[in-house]
Image (cartoon, rainbow, N blue to C red):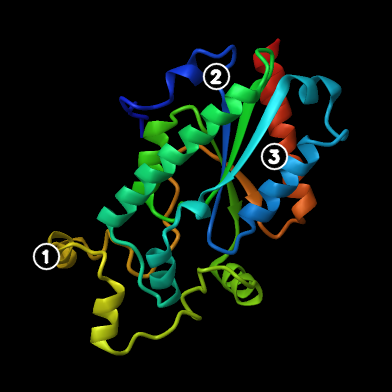
Amino acid sequence: MPDHRSSQIMPSSIMASHHVPLMIVVFGRPGAGKTTVSEEAVRLLNTKTCSVETAATANYLHLDLDVCVPQWMRDNFAKGIYPTIQQRATFITDACKYVNEQMMIQSQSASAKEKLVVIIAFSFVNTDMRIKFREQFPHSNWILIDTTKDIAEDRITRREGHYYKGANNACSCTDEAEKEHASLHDTSENKSNRDVTEASDNNEWEFQPVDFNHIILDGCETISNNARRIVEFIQSETSQHSS
């Protein structure tokens, strides 16, 4: 599927910089380990384990898009009520704005010789959110932390403090009034289209197949090994563009 550019892909101040940012999107099922692996990759990039040349010519920005998830949506997730297509469209628009804002801030603090490297961590369960994000950032590189549904669900049951509890652990909303209350942020127009869009809305929150080029990392590998694979990719890309 070809990328379609948006009229607001990237702030002009970033595009006008010496280097176009290198963006890495680490994605996969909830519980795959995206945040942990990407954080370890950033830690490695900021230590002396990386080549002197890479460390001196790159400025690293790590963004976990979970910070963009509003509280009402977190509350719904905990009850097993997942966002509709319209709600996801609003979310990903806001998330892209957040990424652009953070890149602009980071680029202002970087020297002219430094290449901005942005590492994004987010599940991107749904195809529609992937499409919207890739429209905004057509040069992004996607790395899938690949795990089975069972392994991801097992990890979810053992983690603490996260709003997503997994399909098997969400609070049961048996009362229709409670479901309606949890969906207050859904508009009447959204509700009228619910029957038509039920399948596309991904009501079971299943990780949808990926239909574009991406790198696959084994989610059963160690955190350090997968982090090093990401670091190696970044080093390869930055050295190619600097040569």
On screen, 67 above or below 59? Answer: below
Amino acid at the residue labelled 1: Ser
* Circles 2, 1 touching at the beta carbon (< 8 Å): no
Mark found first going from the N terminus, 2 or 1: 2
On screen, 37 above or below 150? Answer: above
Crowding at dot 3, Cα within 10 Å, few <14 / some 14-19 / many 20+, comes out as: many
Residue wearing tag 1: 192
Quarter of the rendering occupied by the C terminus: top right
Q: How many marks?
A: 3
- Compared across the picture, whether 95 is left or right of 20 comes to left
Residue at figure coordinates x 79%, y 21% from the top left: 56
Residue 141 in the image, given as x and y percentages of width and height: 55, 34
Residue 153 in the image, given as x and y percentages of width and height: 57, 72
* Circles 2, 3 touching at the beta carbon (< 8 Å): no
Residue 239 in the image, given as x and y percentages of width and height: 72, 19
Amino acid at the residue labelled 3: Ile
Q: Nearer the viewer, mark 2 or mark 3?
A: 2
Between the residue at mark 2 and the residue at mark 3, the CA separation in whole angstroms equals 19 Å
Residue wearing tag 2: 20
Amino acid at the residue labelled 2: Val
Crowding at dot 1, Cα within 10 Å, few <14 / some 14-19 / many 20+, comes out as: few
Residue wearing tag 3: 230
Between the residue at mark 1 and the residue at mark 3, the CA separation in whole angstroms equals 44 Å
Between the residue at mark 2 and the residue at mark 1, the CA separation in whole angstroms equals 43 Å
Crowding at dot 2, Cα within 10 Å, few <14 / some 14-19 / many 20+, comes out as: some
Q: Nearer the viewer, mark 1 or mark 3?
A: 1
Mark found first going from the N terminus, 2 or 3: 2
Quarter of the rendering occupied by the N terminus: top left
